[in-house]
Image (tube, rainbow, N blue to C red):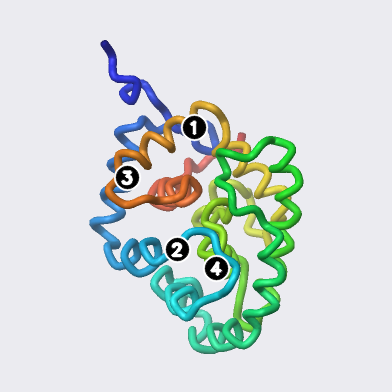
Amino acid sequence: MVDEKTVMQLRLPRNQVRSFEEVVTTISNYRKDCPAVIDLFDRTIDGPHDDITPVDVLSLHALEAFGGRVHPMTPLTSLWLERDNITDSVCPVTKRDIDEITDEEVDSEVPKVAHALRVIDGIKGFGSTSSAKLLHRLRPNVGAIWDSHVQQWYERKKPRRPSWVDWLRTVYSQVRQDDNRRCLLAVRESLDVCLPLLRIWDIVLWQSKPPQRALV
């Protein structure tokens, strides 16, 4: 009997396809290359939660949320001082996994997630990337990670700010697509660290080079 996993595929943007084994290898290589990221950022996420903890704040530096454009303590201090406002914007967002909610629930959640991202983006020193990474900590179940490399998979030109609503709808539809969902769930089961489906998706995109041709 053929192992179902051997025929599983993950369809990425731009009609790129990765086999189940390729995805597992990609995640394994990422763990080898960036062990501190997994340990300090991913392993310290205590599931979906509302209140911002000191670990949430400090772990952003492990994922290089601010790059070299600003001294990290400036936005981290602002975040800590404004954490109650962030909590208020995040509370309405579902704590259920992206693969468990219905299409109707997705439609109602996208504006809530986008609103939370815009509120976080309003913190001094924060931008699109750092906002997405913080929301992923608070809502790893629905918080997709955006950065300049992921952007290359979705946009022809880098916008000043992503259109959160449009981008979230696109990512959610891709991750929730039946074959992709089955592949991502199987990959997660094969790992010795429990990663959200959206984090697996993010790592695969981040570790892969998008094709240099017209978007489709």
Q: CA distance from mark 1 to mark 4?
A: 25 Å
Q: CA distance from mark 4 to mark 3?
A: 24 Å
Secondary structure of the residue carrying tag 3 is helix
Instruction: Identify the mark nearer the N-term, 1 or 2.
Output: 2
Relative to the observer, which residue lies in front, 209 or 136?
A: 136
Residue at mark 1: 180
Element carrying mark 1 = helix
The amino acid type, in three-letter code, at marker 2 is Asp
Residue 135 image offset from top left, x and y in percent: 58, 64
Foreground: 29 or 117? 117
Q: Sequence order check: which comes first, mark 2 or mark 3? A: 3
- For disc 3, the marked residue is 26
Residue 168 horizontal/vertical position (percent): 65, 49
Label 1 and label 2: CA atoms lie apart by 25 Å
Q: Which mark is residue 134?
A: 4
Q: Who comes first in sequence, dot 1 or dot 4?
A: 4
Most extreme residue toward the top, as rendered?
1
Front disc: 3 or 1: 1
Distance from Cα at disc 3 to Cα at disc 1 = 16 Å
Label 2 or label 4, whichever lies nearer to me, is 2
Q: Secondary structure at mark 4?
A: helix
At a point 36% along the width and 21% down the height, the residue shown is 7
Residues at discs 2 and 3 in contact (Cβ within 8 Å): no
Q: Nearer the viewer, mark 2 or mark 3?
A: 2
**Residue 8 is at least partly visible in this image:** yes
Q: Hey, what amino acid is under mark 1?
A: Asn
Q: Which residue is mark 2?
A: 46
Asked which quadrant contains residue 175, the reply is top right
Q: How far, Cα to Cα, is label 2 from label 3?
A: 24 Å
Residue 110 placement (x, y as % from top left): 71, 50
Q: Residue at x 53, y 83 (%)?
A: 76
